[in-house]
Structure formats: structure tokens, C-alpha cells
Image: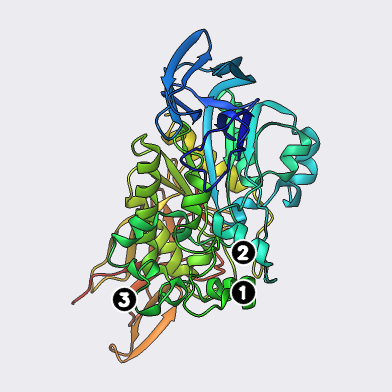
Amino acid sequence: MYRTVQTAARFFLVILFPIATWAQIGLPDIFSDHMVLQRHLPIPVWGTAPAGSEVAVRFNEFEINALSDKDGKWEVTLAAMAEGGPYQMSISGNGETIVLKDILVGEVWLCSGQSNMEWPLKNCTEGELEIPNASQPAIRFFHLKKKHNTYSTPYTSEQLVEFTKGHFFYPANWEPCTPETAAEFSGVAYFFGKELSESLKVPIGLIQNAVGGSPAQSWASRSALASHPQLQSLVDFSGNKTWLDSEIIHPWLAERAKQNWGDLGNKGDAPLPGHPFSPGYLFDFALQPLAPYAIRGAIWYQGESNATHPASYFAIMDMLLKSWRSLWGQGDFPFYFVQLPKIGNRNLWPEFREAQEKCLAIPNTGMAVAIDSGHPTDVHPKEKKVIGLRLARLALLKAYSKKIAAESPGLSSSEWRTDGKEVVLYFNNTYDGLTVKGQETPLGFTLQGYTENGSLETILKPEKIIIEGEKIKLFLPDGFLPVRVKYAWAPNPDNNVVNSAGLPLAPFNLMLNGNN
């Protein structure tokens, strides 16, 4: 993934993207015609040249020089600038020059995760109407496309060598948004970028590196995973164990890796071949080659491949974000993620959605609640526009300080006396108040507790539910001692409470304080 002009040096990521031995100046693929550079932030530019070479980078009437080190690496940092373009950038050294054209300065976002982020616009419910009108020259895509799929078929020995070396993606370059490029690009990311473009009126650059099936631990650095006691089994291979033996991975991940490796992956004490589901793999080969390209932030749609182990997800995501933010060196850049939607055949998804919500404790994060969407049996719901728009509105509110209603309501506090006949729930982010969508009766609430003087455990619905602005009253049956109040606490719940902006109430599982 390095473009070169008659060049020859070795780069520090040569194991990832070899540079031809006949070239002199090398650039990562992320620097190409049509790219979008991040406004209002310093802009790193880096590459390779023969050791000790002087390299000059010229952009927007400015010039900055660097000297390549003994390993042939060089890097310069351009001053922050406002949105604009199109511009040209030239990189010169040793009598050779690379000229990059049609460069815009605007907002750049990383769009990552697994298959629901990877899901192309052409396969979305909205794609048929959207694609013919997708000529958006101020929106640009950098799309990392997989060279090898992760289906259940065995890989060849040549593919295993490619995987192990990290040659997982095709070479990429920036492309303007057209019906042809948009059709193949992430539907979620497309609608996210389009909404930002229409609201901010600046160029938008979207970097897609999502990989279907990938667990969160493959996107975190191995050193970060090793530093957390709850996650060490993912990377500590003592006693002839491998990541396949970790007690906190989804069983499907190990099964699929073994299917891909076939007999070629069963070589006794030999190291396992590379695989995009292995811990740290995508951090090494889908993130490090992009950094430190200046970005505003990241959007993330992932979790299906971790949902069997909700107890470890917060720790993984905490280490993931520490890895990413350390790699970029931009501080705690924004990170907005999607809480998993409805599905009917995943028994731990309620607990996993709760684990995702806990990730809001990580600085500068936001969560798009999707519990009003999804499909009873399909892990890939086709309606992606609503997800992209919710992520965009989170960004407009949190990253760009737009005064808009962008956050779903969530439970903030509750009141109940042991001799009372009602539980009162209070919520935040209600804006002009809570309401119901589609019906008059609020749906999705269940009560867990005891009847017959505490001798019989039962789950039932409230006798009556009243919505009053930012609070909801649940009325209890006679003789019922409540222990928990749950909302949308099922893999595929029947729920309909929203705020005045139409954003769904987030699921919750509330333990009531009684005579404990």
C-alpha cells in the first residue's frame, strides 16, 4: 500500500507494504489525489527516501523540509489550516517529485468495526434510491478492501503467507463520491458523511477499514491487551495455549479461523498463521498504516463477535481506545459507537447492550441507540440510513457543538418505597418530553419480583403506565414486591418509548432498593 516514484528505500512498515527496490520517494497510500486533510489540526505527512536525503513538502503556498533518517523514514507536520481547496501537494527529493492533485481540507472520520459497518450502500434498503443521486464531489472515500474473505472455506498456502505478513487489503487511494464508489462503500458511513456535509458545508473525508466478523480485540494493540489482567488470556500463550484457547472469545471465532487454516494451520508447535480475528491483527495491519493521518474522530459499529462475553467488553474497548488514541497522538479524539439493535436468536444481547452502554464512561464517547431497529433473525439489518444519521447527529452535537437533539433518553434515577404502589422513573435527554411511537400504550416494561408474601418469583407487566414529561410512573399489582424494573430487556424486544426527537429510550435493567 505504498505508491512510489523511481524509488528505493525501506519504510518502517515495510513488513506491511513493501516498497519496490527501484524507487526513491515513497508515500503511504493514504496520501493520494483527491484526499481530504483535516482542518484546524496540524497535518502530519510522512514517507520514505534514501537515508540522509532532504525531502521538501509544498502545500498551499507553504514549504517544509525534512531529512530522512538512517532507516529512510521522514515526516513533516504542516500547520493547521481552515477548510478549502482544491489544492496540490508536491513532495520532492533526490531530483524526483510526486504531485498530488485535487486535495481538499475539511473533516476526516475513520469508519471502523465489523460487517454492519462494512455493509455496502448497494445492499441497503435505501441504496436503490440513494445511489443514482450519490454524486457528492466534496465527499471523498478511502476504502480499504479485503484481498481475502473470511468465509468458511480453507485458505491456500499462498493466502496463509499473505495473511501472516499482513497483506490483507488491496492497495487503496482516495476517490470522490460517485454513484459507482458510493455503491461499494459502507452504507452507515455514507449516510454519516452526507449528513455532515449538508450540515457543516465543508469537505468530508471518510476512511473505511471495517472487517466483517472481526472482534474488538483484533483492533486493540497486543501490548494494551497484555496490560489488562482481564484480557491477558487473549495474548498470553504460555503452556502451549494460543488465542484460540482464551475463555473470553466467541466460539465462532476459533471455529472460523480453524476452517480458514484447514490442515495448513495444524503444524504441531509451529506458530499459528495470521488471521484477522486474532488479537492485535487489525490494529497492526488496518490501523497502524493509517496513523498519524490527522482525523477528527471515529465511528464504530461492532460487537456481534463479542456478544457471548459481555463481562469483558468494557475492558477490551477501554484498551482499544487507549491503543488508538496513543497511536494517533491527537488526545482523546471523538469516538461514537452503535449499540446493537434487535435480533431474536442471541440470548446474551441484552447484557451485551448494557456492556456497550458502560463504554460511555470512556472519555469523549457517544452511543447511537438502535433498539427500535434490527431484524428478528438477520444479524445484518438492511436499514442503515437511520444508524448513519444518528451517528452524524452525535458528531454534530458533541464534536461540532451544534444545538440539536441527538441523544437517546436514558434512565437517570428512580423512586420507590417498600409500601408504595408505584415506581417512578426519571430520564435524561428527553428534550420536550417522552412519548410513544406508533401506539398509545407504552411497551417494553417488565417487572421482576415476588408475590404471595415473597414466596413466589414472577415476571409481569405493570398494571398501568403513565408518561409525564421526563418521568414514567409504573403502577404495581396488589401484593407484588418488585426487585427489578426492565425496559427492552430481550434480544428482540417489543418497545416504543421515544423522546420528542423520536430517538428510542435505551434498554435498562434497574435493581430497586428495598428492605435489603
Question: Contact, CB < 8 Å: mark 1 with mark 2?
Answer: yes
The outermost residue toward the top is 61
Residue position marked by numbered label 1 in the rendering? 264
Where does label 3 land, which residue?
483
Q: Nearer the viewer, mark 3 or mark 1?
A: 1
**Where is residue 236 drawn, in percent x and y?**
35, 69
**Residue type of the residue flagged with mark 3:** Val
* Type of the residue with mark 2: Leu
User: Of callouts 1 and 2, which one flags the residue occurring earlier in the amino acid sequence?
Assistant: 2
Earlier along the polypeptide chain: callout 2 or callout 3? 2
Query: SS for tag 2?
Result: helix
For the residue carrying disc 3, how many other residues have a C-alpha within 10 Å: few (<14), some (14-19), or many (20+)?
some
Looking at this view, is 215 or 343 the one in front?
A: 215
- Location of the N terminus (image quadrant): top right
Residue that numbered label 2 is attached to:
160
* Residue 261 seen anywhere in this rendered image of the structure: yes
Is 422 situated left or right of 40 in this image?
Answer: left
Q: Residue furthest left?
A: 516
Looking at the image, can residue 502 be seen?
no
Q: Quadrant of the C terminus?
A: bottom left
Identify the residue at image location x=51%, y=70%: 272
Front-most of 101 and 349? 101
Distance (Cα) linking label 2 and label 3: 53 Å
Q: Nearer the viewer, residue 310 or 374?
A: 310
According to the image, what is the colour scheme of the structure? rainbow
